[in-house]
Amino acid sequence: AMRESYSSENDAGFKTIKPTAGDIVVVGGRGKLGALFVKMFRLSGYKVLVLGRDDWHRAEELVGNASLVVVSVPIDRTVETIERLPKLPADCTLADLTSVKQPAMKAMLASHNGPVVGLHPMFGPDIASFAKQVIIFCEGRSSEQYSWVLEQMKLWGSNLVESNGQEHDETMSLVQALRHFTSFAYGMHLQSENADLKRLLAFSSPIYRLELAMVGRLFAQDPELYVEIITAAPENVKMFKRYLSNFGEALELLEQGDSDAFVKRFREVSDWFGHFATQFQAESRDLLLAAHDRVTH
Ligand code: NAD
């Protein structure tokens, strides 16, 4: 039913969860992710204003009737941008879309006394729809006053998952930083081996194409964003070193020709993955089936 309402309402627009809302102001709304949210809020019947880099001289006017201000500027400008905001209406919700949550949460709570919510869309601006896309949200203050924002995003089809700044940032180390870093290293390796990507693709069945795509898509995007995500937490580099040491350990088993030890280690990891291993196998099969259906029907 969710999918149906999604695809049928996509062109005509979405139901407005809070018709009495004032303006929605997106700071950085001409950027990649900001523009996507500007579009979605407009499609949902809200009046949306953009506060861009050159609009600070009229910032007070822009936020004067705001019910929601969303900050979507480059990560390293986020805190200073939040601090620079003029006084917001008391009942206005202040939110951000930044990939690193603790500094933004702290700055938002300090600079605004009204409702605050941190958001992290776990996707980039290239998504075809919001259906099933994960958005992490971190409670700042007065959730009863910003719940309409979450409800609106649920109506777009997204999957809202609650966290707090600390858990979010720690989990992101493994969900994003490690993943992007290993994709980067993989890509670097393909380059230095001078791999023939065309032939690699030709030799790849769907599951291997998917893996190649996961790596290759990184290089279609902004290096700045990935540097920020990869280096977001100072502990990330230490964690990458532990990864490297596991890599080295596995390599040593191979170098020693110790396939028994390798198999033993493999089984230990399998046991640790437990039922998730078979779940992941089924999930990847279903994903590929769904992708195949989309291409052929
Ligand atoms: P972007 O560079 O495309 O957009 C940033 C926008 O902010 C630009 O339009 C820029 O002109 C504007 N800007 C810069 N300084 C400003 C200022 N002082 N005042 C007002 N506007 C200013 O970046 P993006 O990829 O859209 O990322 C924006 C935010 O979204 C970041 O916090 C990032 O962590 C987050 N995010 C991005 C992605 C992604 O895949 N792109 C995914 C999840 C979260």
Image: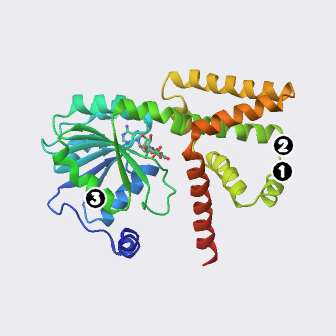
Residue at x 33%, y 35% (from the top left corner): 164
Looking at the rendered structure, the kind of residue marked 3 is Gln
Is residue 297 among the parts visible in the rendering?
yes
At label 2, counting other C-alpha atoms closer than 10 Å, the crowd grade (few under 14, some 14-19, many 20 or more) is few
Label 1 – label 2 distance at C-alpha: 7 Å
Question: Does dot 3 land on a helix, a strand or a loop?
Answer: helix
Q: Earlier in the sequence, mark 3 or mark 2?
A: 3
Q: Nearer the viewer, residue 38 or 100?
A: 100
Of badges 3 and 2, nearer the viewer stands 3
At label 3, counting other C-alpha atoms closer than 10 Å, the crowd grade (few under 14, some 14-19, many 20 or more) is some
Looking at the rendered structure, the kind of residue marked 1 is Asp
Q: Are marks 1 and 3 in contact (CB under 8 Å)?
A: no
Residue designated by label 1: 196
Checking the image for residue 281, the label placed there is none
Question: Does dot 1 land on a helix, a strand or a loop?
Answer: loop
Label 3 – label 2 distance at C-alpha: 47 Å
Looking at the rendered structure, the kind of residue marked 2 is Asn
Q: Earlier in the sequence, mark 1 or mark 3?
A: 3
Q: Nearer the viewer, residue 212 or 95?
A: 212
Q: Position of residue 46 (x, y in %)?
A: 25, 61
The N terminus, quarter of image: bottom left
